[in-house]
Image (cartoon, coloured by chain):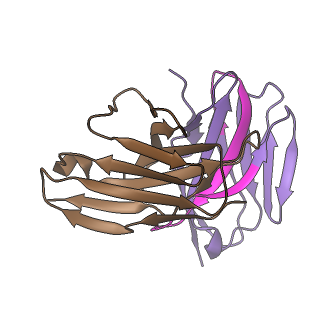
Chain colours: A purple, B brown
Amino acid sequence: TQLLEQSPQFLSIQEGENLTVYCNSSSVFSSLQWYRQEPGEGPVLLVTVVTGGEVKKLKRLTFQFGDARKDSSLHITAAQPGDTGLYLCAGRFSGTYKYIFGTGTRLKVLA
Amino acid sequence: SAVISQKPSRDICQRGTSLTIQCQVDSQVTMMFWYRQQPGQSLTLIATANQGSEATYESGFVIDKFPISRPNLTFSTLTVSNMSPEDSSIYLCSAETGGTDTQYFGPGTRLTVL
């Protein structure tokens, strides 16, 4: 069974702090996506990474794909209350068409 | 990108009844997926809706319980049949255009079964 483990599961921080969320698997991804979901809405795509070692930035968010394409991280600099939400990674494994979602990280940023 | 709408946005149903959820995409897409999500938790793939052929179901999900239609490249339906309270969940559809590794989601349907 292919699994995506995210850590931490929950995170509550003060506005202005930095944080990192991890997404790990024992299998190799052909691509990996990060999503943010707010209550009552569907997940919104933040980024797709496909190349081992790739780093992408989206304003205060930095996404890194591991060299071996088995893991990824999301780093948020100077978190704001608007960053509050459920963060999900989703991986597509080589040779498959479907996505497997990570266990999720619930982030709360306090003003 | 693709914009996806779902109907209904929420419903409260009696056990033993069925509900059909509609998913409409504003452009033609190759792949459409149906997921289930318990509030505050991650997503579990139910099935992949294939245009012109039967849906492909994941382990633990069967066609008799979750029949899916995909009549064209912009539309799909998921029916939750013979509902029980355990079917109470959020149901999400998503779509991906071929070869993009990019999946877009609808807003979800919140289902409560009494």
Query: Where A69 sits versus A36, above or below?
Result: above
Q: Quadrant of residue A81?
A: bottom right
> Is the stretch drawn in magenta largely helix, strand or loop?
strand
Instruction: Farthest residue to the bottom: give it.
Output: A111
Residue sitting at x 64%, y 68%? A83
Q: Position of residue A5 (x, y in %)?
A: 56, 35
Query: Where A43 sits versus B45, above or below?
Result: below
Q: Position of residue B29 (x, y in %)?
A: 65, 49
Quarter of the picture holding the C terminus of chain A? bottom right
Query: Where B1 sits versus A102, above or below?
Result: below
Front-lying residue, B94 or A58:
B94
Q: Position of residue B103 (x, y in %)?
A: 65, 49
Q: How many marks?
A: 0
Q: Quadrant of residue A14?
A: bottom right
The reply to whether residue B11 is in sight is: yes
Front-lying residue, A48 or B16:
B16
Q: Quadrant of residue A11?
A: bottom right
Q: Is residue A26 magenta?
A: yes
- In the image, taking residue B45 as reference, residue A75 lies left or right, namely right
Front-lying residue, A111 or A84:
A84
Front-lying residue, A64 or B5:
B5
Residue sitting at x 19%, y 49%? B83
Q: Position of residue B72 (x, y in %)?
A: 55, 49
Query: Where B89 sits versus B30, above or below?
Result: below
- In the image, taking residue B104 as reference, residue A59 lies left or right, namely right
Magenta part of the chain = A23-47
- In the image, taking residue A11 as reference, residue A80 lies left or right, namely right
Residue sitting at x 63%, y 74%? A82
The reply to whether residue B39 is in sight is: no
